[in-house]
Amino acid sequence: MERPAASIAIQVLPQSVSGDEVLEIVDKVIAYIKSTGLKTVVGPFETVIEGDFDKLMDIAKECQLICIREGAASLLTYIKVAYNPNGGTWSIDEKIAKHI
């Protein structure tokens, strides 16, 4: 199995919007992430994506811009990055398969 060069876990927290609006904005961010076609796992606090490092960084940026375009005055974004350009990183499946 070929390992991805990188994976990220991203959590966006839109600010200055109501509770329901937060969920609507986060849902739009998740829909965008899924539309990229990359391996994605949505969790209750963050979404994990794996693939090319530069592509993942572009996706992380767009996630933040979506929040602003959708009405958040500001946002907090938490991103965890695993990156290994030489040997790849453990895939999402390798990390969670034994727990499913």
Image: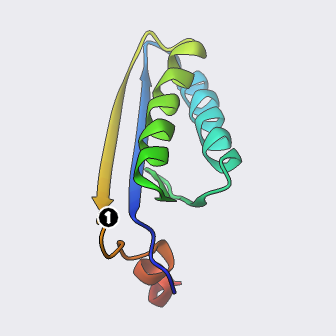
| 89 lies left or right of 44 | left
- Name the residue furthest front: 86
Q: Is residue 86 above or below residue 81?
A: below
| 29 lies left or right of 61 | right
Quadrant of res 61? top left
The residue lying at 41 percent from left, 60 percent from top is: 7
Quadrant of res 83? bottom left
Helix, strand or loop at mark 1: loop
- Check disc 1: other Cα within 10 Å, few if <14, some if 14-19, many if 20+: few
Quadrant of res 11? top left
What coloring was used for the rendering? rainbow
Q: Which residue is mark 1?
A: 85
The residue lying at 29 percent from left, 66 percent from top is: 84
Q: Nearer the viewer, residue 11 or 62?
A: 62
Q: Name the spot of residue 72 as percent of width and height, x first.
A: 49, 14
Q: Name the spot of residue 45 as percent of width and height, x first.
A: 43, 50
The quarter in which the C terminus is drawn is bottom right
Q: Is residue 51 above or below residue 60?
A: below
The residue lying at 42 percent from left, 45 percent from top is: 54
Instruction: Give the number of marks.
Output: 1
Q: Nearer the viewer, residue 85 or 12?
A: 85
Q: Is residue 33 above or below residue 29?
A: below
Residue type marked 1:
Pro
Q: Nearer the viewer, residue 4 or 19?
A: 4
The residue lying at 49 percent from left, 46 percent from top is: 55
Q: Name the spot of residue 75 as percent of width and height, x first.
A: 38, 22
Q: Name the spot of residue 81 as percent of width and height, x first.
A: 31, 54
